[in-house]
Image (tube, rainbow, N blue to C red):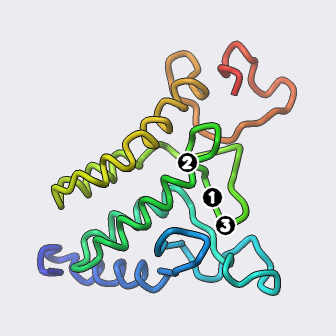
Amino acid sequence: RYWAFGAEAEVAMATQAAVAWNMIYTPAEAGPVLPVSRSWSFVPEEENPDFRYVTFCWDNLFASWIAAHHEGGRPVAYSNLIQSVRSKTAAGFVPNFAAALKKSQDRTEPPLGAYVLRALHRRSGEVWLVELLYDDLKDWNDWFVRRRMVDGLVVLGSWNEQPGHCPPSKCNDM
């Protein structure tokens, strides 16, 4: 299938190989995930090797999209997308990073999940994944409207509670 990438076929092969190399299975998740690195972790190795990974919102969403383009990669792409979206915080956003025992509570990335889900749906025509993730992705997008709008624009970045950082009238009580 790499012929479909034309002059970029070699780049597509290398990219998909890198994504596949990082794939892990851990009992902490419901299926395989595609972290950005096998060695990046927030848990010391001697504490628990099952939790030696970290996922990053954007990176993992793009990894799902890349994996779906590989013949036979759809199940891993779906699993990774599900694990990424389902790492959603109680506040309603998909965290910037998540690991088995820790996730960022102060920041996220632009809500690209719905775009990736739509692209995967267009490739496969399967509805079950849309049905599974729709509410979580809607929560994430709604969170931006509720919590990160200033003068009608979405404000990206980290929630910073330092005095004077962002007046409450401008930050929607982030």
| 101 versus 72 height, above or below | above
Q: Amino acid at mark 3?
A: Ala
Q: Residue at x 72, y 60 (%)?
A: 102
Residue sitting at x 75%, y 18%: 167
Q: How far across and how far down the image is residue 22, in percent?
A: 49, 81
Q: Given the image, on which type of amino acid does mark 2 rest?
A: Val
The image position of residue 120, as x and y in percent, is: 26, 58
In the shown orientation, is residue 164 left or right of residue 170?
right
Quadrant where the image shows the C terminus: top right
Mark number displayed over residue 42: none
Q: Dot 2, crowdedness within 10 Å: few (<14), some or many (≥20)?
A: many
* Residue 137 picture location, percent across and down: 43, 42
In this rendering, the answer to whether 2 lies above or below 107 is: below
According to the picture, the residue beneath numbered tag 2 turns out to be 94
Spatial distance from mark 1 to mark 2, Cα to Cα? 8 Å
Instruction: Report the residue marked by disc 1.
Output: 97
The residue that label 3 is drawn on is 100
Q: Quadrant of residue 101?
A: bottom right
In this rendering, the label closer to the viewer, 1 or 3 = 3
**143 with respect to 128 (left or right):** right
The residue shown at (59%, 46%) is 108
Q: Is residue 165 above or below residue 129?
A: above
Q: Earlier in the sequence, mark 3 or mark 2?
A: 2
Callout 1, which amino acid?
Phe
Q: CA distance from mark 1 to mark 3?
A: 10 Å
